[in-house]
Amino acid sequence: MYRVILEKLKDKKIAILGFGREGKSTYNFIRKYFPDMKLTILDKYSIELDDKNVNVIIGDKYLDNLNDYDLIIKSPGIPLKDIDISLFKDNITSQLELLLEVFSDNVIGVTGTKGKSTTSSLIYEVLRNQRDNVYLIGNIGVPVFDEVELYNKDSILVVEMSSHQLEFIKTSPHIGIILNLYQDHLDHDGNIQRYHNNKLNIFKYQSSSDYCIYSSDNDYLNKYIDDTYKGIKYTVRFDFEAISSNSIRIKDKDIYIDGEIVYQDKERLLLGDANLKNIMFVLGVCKILNLDFSMAYNTISKFRGLKYRMEYIGKYHNINFYNDTIATIPEATISAIQSIDNVDTLIIGGLDRGISYEDFIDYLNKSTIRNIICMPETGYYIGKMLINKNVFFVNTLDEAVDISIKNTKDDMACLLSPAAASYNQYKNFEEKGLVFENLVKNFKN
């Protein structure tokens, strides 16, 4: 079926916009089947590539003249909010769009501000224990073209979808999931409405035979979802209200679909209510695909979660250390605090992307956390607003770990959960998480 994608690329004047992981994946896919095709690669930063059939345009003006191409295969991380795209908007595509144009009936798309990777991975694990020919791709770290030759009409593709990937799509997946919506990525999207609209594209182009699963108790989602979205709606609420057709609800930590119990919360390794709600979405997929709920339970109970997501590093110096660098918004940090017992020290702070922290500050002031270690940039602002706390301002994680070990009470927890993006000091949250883990494990007085 991938050959249908090749036909869409054939004889086109193509620009690959962005040459990171996905851009390189696009280049490799095209080159494999069109070794002599003339291509243009556009990126702000330098590119090392030995290919006489490639025109490379780099520097501050790399976004000029985008109207010159039949197809612009855009990488997710390239923002276009500051330029007029009206003349070439219809020419913008992506790996995700090209995949959906051919395989949309096979795709389970998962998006949301937080929880995408965990939920996508858990859906994948549940599926692969009951079905063959299942793939986990997308924003999880596997570009969709990397394995595209393996997909066929019987494949099930679990695709984690970021707002950046969804921004320009014109085709929606057969099963679309929006876990939640909060403030995030305002640096890329410019404003919260645009960010949310990008997310909602996962439902926008569905037909009446498709499915959309969403949190009806999330304020933003409850406001946006209406009859303009044609998919069959499954509503997820973290309460036992509004039981109706296609309702996924919770009561005493047990999960019900249409009023019938499908999951008893007896044993799981995933921490907290946020992950219990993620499980509700997984079970919604089980219902739609007629999977075995008891087998799903066994898979869920053994699932340990992903690195840097409320990850327990271990007990060092009589302190329980947790690594949650994936928490890039206040709501995620609050969820981690509520999920982990006895947080005595919290390490926060990262890139300032214009997110409001007023409610977060109020939450911290009312919390029982004694020590709050504040890192640049957002941590400095938050720390100045805290009262009746031991507040420490630091520049590096080395300092933060040193202070946490000297000030956290024995048998209590130290949690790194930034409530902000990490790339003011680190390449990404994974790098920050790895640095923190190594500092904790190798600390010497």
Image: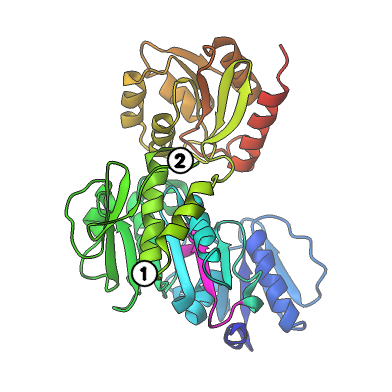
- Marks 2 and 1, how far apart in space? 38 Å
- Observer-side mark, 2 or 1, equals 1
Quarter of the image with the N terminus in it: bottom right
- Give residue 57's position: percent from left, percent from top: 68, 65
Secondary element type, mark 1: helix
Q: Which mark is residue 288?
A: 1
Magenta stretch, residue numbers: 151-167
Q: Do the CB atoms of the residues marked 2 and 1 lie less than 8 Å apart?
A: no
Residue under the image location 20 percent in, 69 percent down? 227
Residue 187: % across, % down: 46, 47
* Quarter placement of the C terminus: top right
Identify the residue at horizontal 42%, vertical 29% (top origin). Answer: 337
Disc 2 residue type? Arg
Sequence-wise, which precedes: disc 2 or disc 1? 1
Badge 1: residue crowd in 10 Å (few <14, some 14–19, many ≥20):
few
Residue at 53% from the left image edge and 80% from the top image edge? 154
- Residue 108, position in %: x, y? 45, 67
| Colour scheme employed for the rendering of this structure | rainbow
Query: Can residue 75 be seen in the rendering of this structure?
Result: no
Label annotation for residue 353: 2
As displayed, is residue 93 above or below residue 357? below
Left or right placement of residue 235 versus residue 152 in this view: left
Q: Is residue 72 left or right of residue 87?
A: right
Q: Position of residue 84 (x, y in %)?
A: 44, 65
Amino acid on which the number 1 mark rests in the picture:
Ile
In the figure, 61 relative to 316: above or below?
Answer: below
| Quarter-of-image position of residue 55 | bottom right
